Amino acid sequence: MLMLLCWLLSPAMADECQSPRKVTEESMQVAWISRTGKQVWDNTYLEVVRTGELRTWLERNGRDTLRLLRGLGMVKGHKGEKDAKKGWKITVFDVRRNVLCRPIVDGIPGEDVGGIPICEESEHKAKWGYRQGFTGCGYIKDTQANVRALDVYRVRWSDAASWGFCVLPLKRFLEES
């Protein structure tokens, strides 16, 4: 009976959240990857990753669009191959740490987790484009390797764009990073 109970609980225990990485810098560079032509309103929250961590991930995993989209939890399975052939862009922002939040489902909004507050409840759900790798733990799941990938943050477009931004075709970013 105990063996059966342990077996039944093991998948749930394996899905427990790990701690997101600590952020100490007051300002940093973050990146939003989206389809070409995707537009948002000023009050829309974007799902972003730290650009430096993204570049490190690319060094370890390769500079292939499909692999990146799977690593960011944006595509899964054979559908990803078709999606990777479409147009993608990367928007890079310099932001202050105080405009970011972490999409952590089981937490108190505003509570500090590693230097970044937990997002308001309205921002706890998976965003369009990132549903496949959404964990609700403040980081993305790599849908190809089925492992934890990069920490993820949310930022309102108007806050992210306040210091300016740079938009590049994703293919160019992959070639030059």
Image (cartoon, grey):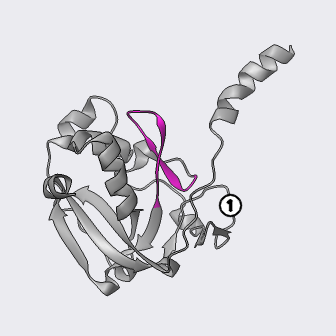
Q: Is residue 138 magenta?
A: yes
Say which residue appears at 54% left-offset and 64% top-offset. Answer: 102
Q: Which residue lies most toward the bottom here?
A: 162
Image quadrant assignment for residue 52: bottom left
Which quarter of the image is occupied by the N terminus?
top right
Residue on which disc 1 sits: 107
The local crowd at label 1, few if under 14, some if 14 to 19, many if 20 or more residues have their Cα within 10 Å, is: some
Please tell me which residue lies in front, 86 or 94: 94
The residue lying at 68 percent from left, 61 percent from top is: 107
Q: Which residues are magenta?
A: 137-152
Please, is residue 114 above or below residue 87 in the view?
Answer: below
The residue closer to the viewer here, 124 or 145, is 145
Instruction: Look at the numbered disc 1 and give the secondary structure of its residue.
Output: loop
Taking 26 as reference, is 16 left or right? right
Residue drawn at the location 50% of the way across and 76% of the way down: 25
**Hey, what amino acid is under mark 1?**
Gly
Q: In the image, residue 76 lies at what x, y percent? A: 34, 35
* Left or right of 146 on screen, residue 42: left
Q: Position of residue 155 (x, y in %)?
A: 43, 72
Magenta-span inclusion, residue 31 = no
- On the question of residue 40 being in view, the answer is no
